[in-house]
Amino acid sequence: MKKLLFALFSGIFVILAFSSCKKYEEAMYNKSDYQIKYIWYKSNSGDPNEVYTYDKKKMLTQIDIVDSANIGGIRTETFTFTYNKDKTVQSVTHVSSDMTEEVNFTYLNRYVKYMTYSINGAIRLTSNFYRDDEKAAKITRIVEIYDRQFFEDMQLYSTPALFNRFVGDYARLQEMAAANTKDLTLYSTKNITYDGDNIVKIEENYPDIHKSITTTMTYSTVLNPYYGLNYCYSNDLLGYSKNAVSQKNVATFYDGTPTNTEATAYDYFDVNKDNYPRVFSYTTEKNPGVFFKTYITYSKEYKD
């Protein structure tokens, strides 16, 4: 489940719901009985690939990742969470042998306004959230501002785990690093379209590399177990839609000319009584007929 963040991520649930008067709500604390406990990528035998740890107040404090399928052997990563007094997420941190990565959130009226990503204390990316009215309702646009020094320093580090998981696509960073520009900052934008409580279109634009990406999604009636997790930001804002994706189509353009399309189909064939998936699979156009399974165990259903 690579890149499941803005955010972006449970104790950090961003509940994107309407009240009886259709007022948009984004409450950064857990409102679900179905907090993820374990995730397996291929089979639910053996040790889980993801372990979620909560404190006595049911706030998510840590996610441990063990991916034995990673080339080079077992890879273990730990992401830790800190909170503000109002239970909003303050930061997510990952420490490796060569760097400390951190994502920090700033809020306006309990709505995410800014997200920053830093390496070893230096801010490398700032994401600005724009909403559809002055009261901070649904996200309409996100503007990302990258520090040019980030790209010049990339060769000093191994692949940044927190960046890939919470923020963006490291491969796209490498593309931007090759951009023929001497600007101190690089920019990208995401324009976002909702249908009800679900994001149905994300239009990304990377002017420095003349590239744009349009992602369209349709949804099943199954509920999204990642709903509200702002670490899901980087995976097509997965944490900001109430339902589980059934079909995703990604179209890539260079200078406005389509160059590539990818389609992914999801099947939720084991769902609990409250409509949350225990087992789902997905298949892509690149691997037709090959189904990649994910198994989820929730704290409510887990028996020691």
Image (cartoon, grey):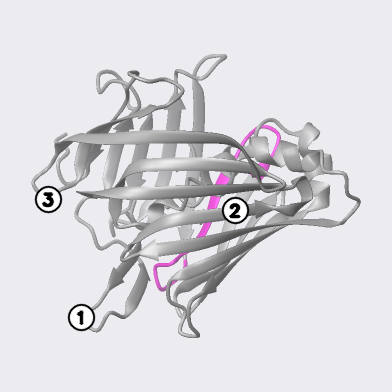
Amino acid type shown at disc 2: Glu
State the extent of the magenta-drawn residues as a range: 84-100
Residue 20 - label = 1
For disc 3, the marked residue is 274
Q: Is residue 112 left or right of residue 35?
A: right
Mark 3 or mark 2: whose residue is earlier in sequence? 2
Q: Nearer the viewer, mark 3 or mark 2?
A: 2
What's the residue at 48%, 82% (across, down)?
A: 133
Above/below status of 42 relative to 196: above
What's the residue at 28%, 18% (across, down)?
A: 46
Cα distance between the residues tagged 3 and 2: 34 Å
What's the residue at 48%, 45% (across, down)?
A: 235
Q: Nearer the viewer, mark 1 or mark 3?
A: 1
Q: Quadrant of the N terminus?
A: top left
Cα distance between the residues tagged 1 and 3: 21 Å
Q: Quadrant of the C terminus?
A: top left
Q: Secondary structure at mark 1?
A: loop
